[in-house]
Image: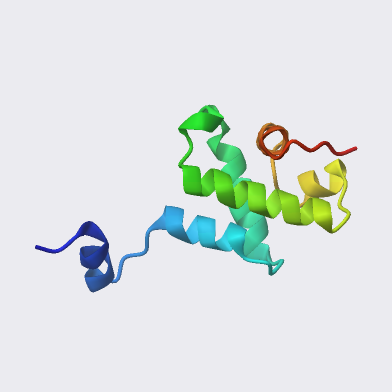
Amino acid sequence: MKTQEQESAATGTIDPMAELCATLFSTEESAKKKIARQTVGTMTQRPWPQLPSRLRSAIRSDVGRLLDAGKGRTEILEAGYSSEVLNQALRDLGRSVS
């Protein structure tokens, strides 16, 4: 019996959530990453705890990387995140940004 992942791989379909997470976990800055950040911003109609845990981890990782690079709140918002997503990620990370 095949698992759902094996069937997806066999048919060549791509899991959009896995691709979104992989893009956010990536250390490379690109247009694709900005689009991924904007996509996450459109998911704010769902409460933060209802987002998949892997996606929340990817967002926290990306926001943390931006903070470590010395980016401010405005720069992170310009990078594509919505203020709601940024606020939640900062809360989870226990960090603040000006």
**Whole-percent x and y of residue 7?**
20, 65
| Figure check: 5 above or below 42 | below
| Figure check: 53 above or below 31 | above
Q: How is the image coloured?
A: rainbow
**Whole-percent x and y of residue 52?**
45, 42
Q: Residue furthest front?
A: 94
| Figure check: 77 above or below 35 | above
Q: Quadrant of the N terminus?
A: bottom left
**Whole-percent x and y of residue 53?**
48, 43
Q: How many marks on residues?
A: 0
Q: Is residue 36 left or right of residue 96?
A: left
- The residue depicted at 70 percent of the width and 40 percent of the height is 93
**Whole-percent x and y of residue 17?**
44, 53
Q: Is residue 22 left or right of residue 77?
A: left
- The residue depicted at 78 percent of the width and 54 percent of the height is 66
- The residue depicted at 55 percent of the width and 31 percent of the height is 48
Res 65 quadrant in image: bottom right
Q: Residue furthest left?
A: 1
Q: Quadrant of the C terminus?
A: top right
- The residue depicted at 62 percent of the width and 65 percent of the height is 26
Res 5 quadrant in image: bottom left
